[in-house]
Image (cartoon, rainbow, N blue to C red):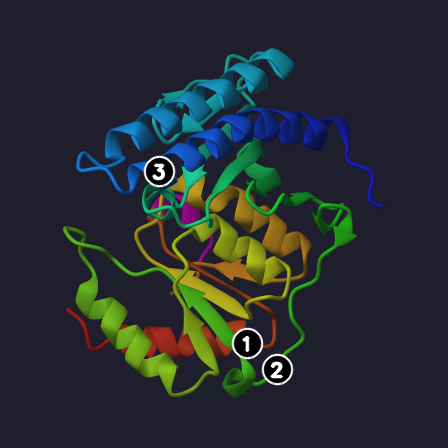
Amino acid sequence: MALKSALINVMDGAARKAARGLVRDFGEVEQLQVSRKGPADFVSAADLKAEQILRRELERARPGYGFCLEEGGVVAASDGRHRWYVDPLDGTTNFLHGVPHFAISIALERDGELVAGLILEPTRDETFWAEKGSGAYLNGRRLRVSARQRLVDSVLATGLPYHGRPGHELALAELDALMSRVSGIRRFGSAALDLAYVAAGRYDGFWEHGLSPWDLAAGIVIVREAGGLVSQIGGGDRMLEKGDILAANDSLHGEIAAVLREAGKSCP
């Protein structure tokens, strides 16, 4: 059984406090599905409430740390060194529709470097966590990315742009280029959990465009500590700034990147 550091315990405690409310609210959302009004406003309130709990708990444990929050924006660090990346509800559309696949995601950046990440999926009580240099874990079990070496044997995950978002042509081109080369492609609706599943070897790779820093930060740490490679799709390490990401094991990362780059050439 892996022993969590004081830092991971802080993150875990905050996530679990917020998760209790989300699980209660999720039960209400499932009931609201049958109502004419629908659950959208309720979900927004649940999201905000979870973020408030996370911020309060993290501030109490680590005063002086800054924040990059999905709802609350950027809060400067008074210590000048640390910043939390917090997504209180990754997979909001799933939550909205009563689909039990969503997560709380927390990461810590120190002096510009991501050093810890935790992703809690409350409906299955799965906690993926990692600290730089200490490995990645699911609850207490050590994680490693998959060992598959052939693209044809792999299962990949991605995200697709929804109504009102750009990038539909590129997404279709990338899917077309990869579908005939792999065993399957999944779209489950939570980038944080997609990255956690790559770390756990459930997926062999994941790519997506148009993401926010709080979607990615924790998963980047966890995948890397599980032995995976993480980069921008076209290469580079500015995922948080640019919002595109490719994560995979070291055998498949380069091949997937090459296919995606070639597909991208067909789109303006």
- Between disc 1 and disc 2, whose residue precedes? 2
Please say if 49 is above or below 19: above
167 lies left or right of 137:
left
Q: Is residue 181 magenta?
A: no
Q: Quadrant of the C terminus?
A: bottom left
- Between disc 1 and disc 3, whose residue precedes? 3
Q: Residue 238 got which mark?
A: none
> In this figure, which residue is indicated by the disc labeled 1?
252
**Type of amino acid under label 2:** Gln
> In this figure, which residue is indicated by the disc labeled 2?
149
Q: Residues within 10 Å of mark 1 (few under 14, many from 20)?
A: many
Residue drawn at 42 percent across, 73 percent down? 185
19 vs 75, nearest the viewer:
19
Residue drawn at 42 percent across, 30 percent down? 25
Image coords of residue 226 (percent x, y)? 68, 57
Image coords of residue 228 (percent x, y)? 61, 62
> In this figure, which residue is indicated by the disc labeled 3?
31
User: What's the CA distance linking mark 1 and mark 2?
Assistant: 6 Å
Q: Residues within 10 Å of mark 2 (few under 14, many from 20)?
A: some
| Contact? badges 1 and 2 (CB < 8 Å) | yes
221 vs 70, nearest the viewer:
70
- Between disc 3 and disc 2, whose residue precedes? 3
User: What's the CA distance linking mark 3 and mark 2?
Assistant: 45 Å
**Type of amino acid under label 3:** Gln
For discs 3 and 2, the disc positioned in front in the rendered view: 3
Q: Which residues are magenta?
A: 236-241
- For residue 87, what is the image quadrant? top left
Image coords of residue 225 (percent x, y)? 67, 53
